[in-house]
Amino acid sequence: MKRIFFFIITNIAILLVLSIFLSLLGFTGILQSNGIDLDYDSLMLFSLVFGMGGSFISLYMSKWMAKSLAGVKVIKSPNNQFESWYVQIVERQSETLGIRVPEIGIFNSPSPNAFATGSSKNNSLVALSTGLIESMNKDEIEAVIGHEMSHVANGDMVTLSLIQGIINAFVIFFSRVIGHFVDRVILKNERGYGIGYFFTVIFAQVILGILASTIVCWFSRRREFRADFGGAQLTSKEAMISSLRTLEKMSAAKLPDQMLAFGISNQGNSQTLRKLFSTHPPIRERILALENTNFSENLNQQQI
């Protein structure tokens, strides 16, 4: 219930901010002054503001949302031996990767998972679930931390937000072009828009959105392989593989939708159709990729 409330309030706030921004830019609608023809410049502006703007506002709110929705407790001063070790590992890996130390947190869940989020590689949050801490040894936990730190160092949050924003803009743009065509050519409305336009836009946006999500998920799966390789380089291939095998045996903790793409485990699915809509590759594929990679070579030379 809390997640639904935050989701609704957040989206209303984003829509309000973007609507005000559009009005300040002098936006009056996507039709030309004659009320008949489509104004492609205005439509492009509308699409970019709501597509890119919504994506990047969500990105900049991601740390706050993670703390609120997942209940992340940020470690400001370690209270026990594990927290001290955890902070030391993150600090050491941050120095190795050449990035600012992220906020370090723990969230309460009996299932194993972890995620990284934040607006940039120097303004991020890394969090582990209590279930992961209890079910893995320190070598495995360090590898999981390395996986999440690699997401941060690779700038995956910004990259996927940019991709999502561009795709959102295309979906918004083409759904309204299709709606305009149906309204003018098929339904023969000469001025303004009839109800058929709005039904067509909604239908086209749903279909295009589903198709577009496969592109975002494909990029996300590629980033997961790269984060696995990064975690293996920061620790060892054996530790990274061992952590994935542990995850394979257990059910991963449910994360808020905004953090799913950056969790250590979203199990993935080996069935072809479902795999298209999965943010993570099947764990078995990730293990095989690690086993078949020679980490004595530079990671940049790997095809991932």
Image: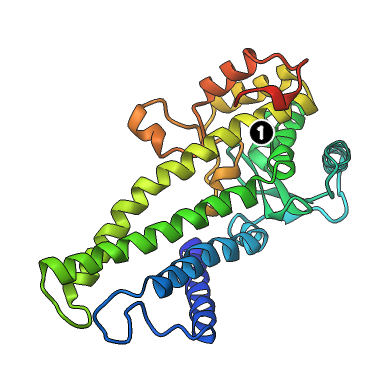
Q: Is 275 situated left or right of 108 in this image?
A: left
Residue at point 30%, 74% (across, down): 38
Q: Is residue 109 above or below residue 222?
A: below
Question: Which residue is label 1 attached to?
Answer: 227
Q: Decide if residue 205 is on the left or right side of residue 197.
A: right
Q: Position of residue 287 (x, y in %)?
A: 59, 19
Residue 257, compared with residue 277, is above or below; it is below
Dot 1, crowdedness within 10 Å: few (<14), some or many (≥20)?
Answer: many
Residue 11: x and y, percent? 48, 69
Residue type at the position of mark 1: Ala
In this rendering, position of residue 272 left or right of residue 73:
left
Image quadrant assignment for residue 175: bottom left
Residue at the (52%, 72%) spot, across then down: 14
- Image point 48% across, 45% down: which residue? 216
Q: Quadrant of the C terminus?
A: top right
- Most foreground residue, 3 or 26: 26
